Amino acid sequence: MAFKPANNIQDLQYFGEFGGVNPSISDSSTYTFLSAKTMFDTFEGNADGCYLYSRHSSPSNLYLGEALAAMEGTETANVTASGMGAITPVIMQLCGAGDHVVSSRTIYGGTYAFLKNFTPRFNIETSFVDITKLDVVEAAITPNTKVLYCESVSNPLLEVADIEGLAKLAKKHNLKLIVDNTFSPLSISPIQLGADIVIHSLTKFINGSSDTVGGVVCGTQEFINDLRNVNNGACMLLGSTMDSLRAASVLKNLRTLHIRMQQHSLNATYLAEKFEKLGLKTVYPGLASHPSHSLFKSMMNEKYGFGGMLTIDVGSIDKANALMELMQEKNLGYLAVSLGFYKTLFSAPGSSTSSEIPEDEQKEMGLSDGLIRFSIGLDADIDRTYNTMRECMISLSILKA
Ligand SMILES: *Cc1c(COP(=O)(O)O)cnc(C)c1O
């Protein structure tokens, strides 16, 4: 693919007000106007370049938003206080009472809970489907459907969405295709494949230092303006605004994302291949055994690899817990939710991040008790990590010596 997301980030230049190499941080909630008329125009949305109030927009948030828009190839973007603070207003902006959503059934637990338990209070219903089957997706579309929702690489099962195929369905039925690209920044560019809106939890790989939550919505100028509209914009009115100081720090971390993603992918590929050779049930989009390996390959910006996420199934929750505790003891990583940190993070999604999903539904989608989700870290010596992990598995009889 000709699209170069990291180049687009690098090409953006914003200087500080004294020529600083980083843009100045806007430390204000409100902004003065030289004339009352300009203030009125800004309220009406007609004064480009003027700031009004930082829940609406602020210079620091705009710098970060523009960098992320450049990464995804959208006209613009709006940063938010968390990933959920991006997802929920987008859905509320696009759907009203009586509307319908078709969503992948394997999505982030919080998104699932929002669509399953929360939006029905506003008479917005969701059909959860196997997103890898385009015929099943199309069959779920009704005359009231407004939104097709998926993750490019799903949490936690690492299913891969056929974004081009889904985009065709969205065009045909006049829906908006929303893609949560949190698991595959830089690797996959959903807009280039036909998606309408891309969302990230910045909390994960993009910020990469597990020191904050954050989110972004990347889309057209028209849609982002709608979200920020003072009269009926869901971002403006629900108020999940990122703080300016934090926007400045996320922007600085974003600049190393391309290097980090390459290392995450390299390390995850190394471990996935070794684990599979040991006979462990391993899921990683970079393995030829992954059902969507060639689909991922056809969509990816090759340089950034297949990402840092992999899962193994060790058979039971007791074994999974024992292994995670032992790996933590050996300083191989942390028993923690979330992802994209320099250290490896592991958790058993069935009893943690996906516990919002009822047990019978977990079974149906293939989310088993013994599943461990890894976010592979930036380890300099991944072979040493591998060998220590293998010793842990042998000592717990998950592997034979
Ligand atoms: C973490 C996550 C979210 C939610 O983001 P927060 O920043 O925790 O609100 C949404 N989608 C995916 C795929 C995630 O991993």
Image: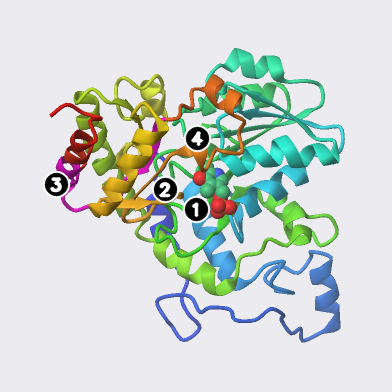
Residue 73 seen in this snapshot: no
Badge 3, how many Cα within 10 Å: few under 14, some, many 20+? Answer: few
Q: Which residue matches tag 3?
A: 384
Question: Residue type at mark 1?
Answer: Ala
**Upstream in sequence: badge 1 or badge 3:** 1
Badge 1, how many Cα within 10 Å: few under 14, some, many 20+? Answer: many
Q: Position of residue 264 (x, y in %)?
A: 30, 46
Question: Residue type at mark 3?
Answer: Arg
Answer above or below: position of 366 versus 337.
Answer: above
Marks 4, 1: nearer the viewer: 4
Mark 4–mark 1 distance (CA, rounded to whole Å): 36 Å
Q: Which residue matches tag 1?
A: 70
Answer above or below: position of 366 versus 125.
Answer: above
Answer above or below: position of 339 versus 130.
Answer: below
Mark 1–mark 2 distance (CA, rounded to whole Å): 7 Å
**Secondary structure at numbered mark 4:** helix
